Each structure stands twice: as C-alpha cells, then as structure tokens.
Amino acid sequence: MHDNKCCSDFQSAVDEYLIRHRSVLDVLTKYQEASARVNRAVAKAVTGCGCVQVAAARQSAPETTTYSELKEHMSSHLVGEPCAQCREIIATEIGHSMFYLAALCNATGLSLHQVMQQEYKNVKTLGAFHLT
C-alpha cells in the first residue's frame, strides 16, 4: 500500500507542478531529453570525473552454461562506483526522467503505480524471457 501512495503522491505532484510543458508532445520530448541527460551523467562520470571506467568486451560464457546460469557470466562493463558527486548528479537526472515519465502517465491517463505493478508481474511471470 505504501508503494501505491508514493507513486500516486508523486504523480499528483507532477500533475500539480507541471505547468508549461503539458502538451503530450512537450512531455515526450522533455522525457527524451531527460533520458539523454541520464546517459550524459553516466558518461561524464567516466570521461570527466573518472570515478568509474568502462571495460567493455564481448560477453562470453562457457558453452555448457545454462540460461539460468548466464547472469553469473555477464558483465555491466563498469569498473568502480560513482563518487558521491557523480552519484548525486546521476540520481538527480534519473529523478527528472521519472518526473516526465509520471507526466506522460498523466497525459495518457495511466497510473504510474499500475504500470509498475503490471511490469513487475510480467517480469516475475516471464523471468529471464521478459525482454528477449
């Protein structure tokens, strides 16, 4: 119940305070811009601050690995953790992205909580096959 209140309170606050960009077109483009800023914040943690590094290579696992064991062999390609300043910037940008996600839910008449609940059910039901 607490999660529902958190989502609905957040969605209501977004509805109350989003004044200038109420058009669905504005919301869509602001959401896309906010998502790009999340990407930029992570990239700057690597290229600007250097608190994290990207060590990317082809994902590989032994051929005898089962699908359920595959996660143990997959890498995020990140080395290290964001410093306090980068973590704060990334969290802020994710928050802005969430703001416009809630605004998109408002514009389309969807409940953010219900969308999250449905996606949670899908993930739990389909497991590893959810996004394949």
Image: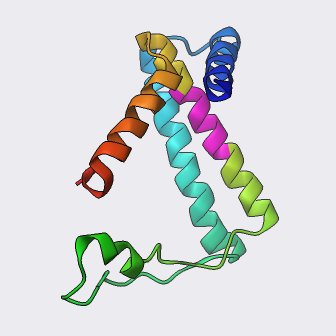
Which residues are the magenta region? 93-101
Q: Give the quarter of the image for residue 109.
A: top left
Q: Is residue 43 above or below residue 89?
A: below
Q: Is residue 67 left or right of residue 69?
A: left
The residue closer to the viewer here, 9 or 87, is 9
The residue closer to the viewer here, 116 or 69, is 69
Q: Give the quarter of the image for residue 25.
A: top left
* Residue 95 magenta: yes
| Image spot of residue 67 (x, y percent) | 24, 71
* Residue 14 magenta: no
| Image spot of residue 115 (x, y percent) | 43, 26
Picture residue at 43% right of the left edge, 77% below the top: 75
Q: Which quadrant does the C terminus fall into?
A: bottom left
| Image spot of residue 54 (x, y percent) | 52, 78
Q: Is residue 90 above or below residue 20?
A: below
Q: Is residue 100 left or right of residue 16?
A: left
Picture residue at 51% right of the left edge, 29% below the top: 101
Picture residue at 72% right of the left edge, 53% below the top: 89
Per the picture, the main secondary structure of the magenta-coloured stretch is helix
How did the renderer colour the structure?
A: rainbow
| Image spot of residue 32 (x, y percent) | 46, 37
